[in-house]
Image (cartoon, helix red, strand yellow):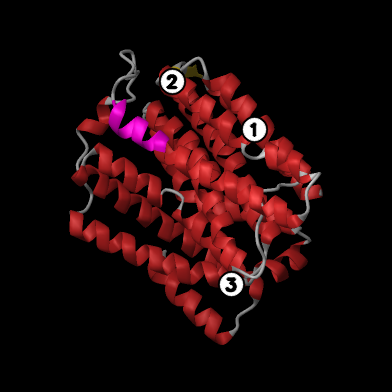
Amino acid sequence: MIAVGLPLSILGSLLHWPVVMMFIIYSLTIVALASYMGRATESIAVHTGPRVGGLINATFGNAVELIIAFFALKAGLITVVLASLTGSVLGNLLLVMGLSFFVGGLKFKRQKFNVFDARHNSGLLVFAVLVAFVIPEVFAQEMNDTKTFALSVGISIILILLYLAALFFKLVTHRGVYQSIEAGGGHSGEEHETAEWGKKKAILILLLATLAVAYVSESLVHTFEEVGEAFGWSELFIGVIVVAIVGNAAEHASAIIMAYKNKMDIAVEIAVGSTLQIAMFVAPILVLISIFFEKQMALVFTVPELIAMVTAVLLAIAISNDGETNWFEGATILAAYLIMGIGFFLL
């Protein structure tokens, strides 16, 4: 796909092919590039060990969303950026987790994962979404734009520091402390993994794929307005559904494959870990980057976005906190995603 997608992306932008056609080419090319980035980070993780590997995965896990959001921010599309952050939270917690539980549940009647990790992540999810996203919305009602942005910057710095502390907690001070004895196939597979590529090759592929994603993402962002008009999509819908799915596609596939192999610890970590990265690292970084742009981005979401994210967090916690799952729980989470998707489409 990359061999075809990249040349077509370059050729199409030079020859000014129809915007809708280019939107599809750019999106498919980014999905293909993201899968290579995922494979490269996995190979590097195998070579460097779980601690460094975990840090690399944390850094590059949401690189595609960060790059797309960066160019959208640069273009002044604040609504699309905030909507794509909302979409990433909903996509990971509802679509990815729902599909993982559903697909895995069709093959295995009961699937278990680390209940300690689930409870630890629950607290962070409540903090990252309910505290850090809802509080600015509440206080912003009584503030002007300058004060709202100052509040957003303060919250962003706190979020990034806590996220780094969470990584340090998980990868260094408490690594392995809460390993589940009855992990149901969640941990054993990781220790015997062999790398797909050598270390140098994996690093080279990761860097080249990241540069290619940056190039294609900048072009993709410029198609949003015309594509929205052509299909009758709002900026909110493009951000929440389209950009979020394109940016997360490779990660989505990885989680579902892991669930089908009964490696539920990894599947849940991809879904929840990626949500935490978005809320505690990607969103704050974008707020800080926006200081240098013409339009600053405050961490203030619309009411539908906030309610959707809060509902997703509460549903995910309610279903995952017992450390086991089945296909019906997956179907329930997917149903919630579909309801929200219809809502955002009609807004």
> Where 309 falls versus 68 (above or below)?
above
Q: Which of 169 and 216 is in front in this view?
A: 169
User: Residue 19, located in which quarter of the rendered image?
Assistant: bottom right
Circle 2 residues within 10 Å: few <14, some 14–19, many ≥20: some
Between tags 2 and 3, which lies in front? 3
Q: Residue 318 carries which label?
A: none
Can residue 304 be seen? no
Can you identify the residue that label 3 sits on?
Answer: 22
Label 2 secondary element: loop
Answer left or right for 166 relative to 88: left
**In percent of the image, x 29 and y 62: which residue is there?**
205
Q: Residue furthest bottom?
A: 15
Q: Nearer the viewer, residue 62 or 326?
A: 62
Label 3 secondary element: helix
Tell me the quadrant of the picture where the N terminus can be found: bottom left
Can you identify the residue that label 1 sits on?
Answer: 130
Residue 159 in the image: state x and y as whole percent: 52, 41
Give the mark nearest the N terminus, 3 or 1: 3
Residue 121 in the image: state x and y as whole percent: 48, 27
> Where 47 falls versus 286 (above or below)?
above
Answer left or right for 92 relative to 186: right
Label 1 secondary element: helix
Answer left or right for 170 relative to 345: left
Cα–Cα span, label 3 and label 1: 38 Å
Q: Nearer the viewer, residue 82 or 332?
A: 82
**In percent of the image, x 81 and y 44: which residue is there?**
142
Cα–Cα span, label 2 and label 1: 33 Å
Q: Which amino acid is tagged 2?
A: Phe
The residues colored magenta run: 165-175
Can you identify the residue that label 2 sits on?
Answer: 108
> Where 262 falls versus 80 (above or below)?
above
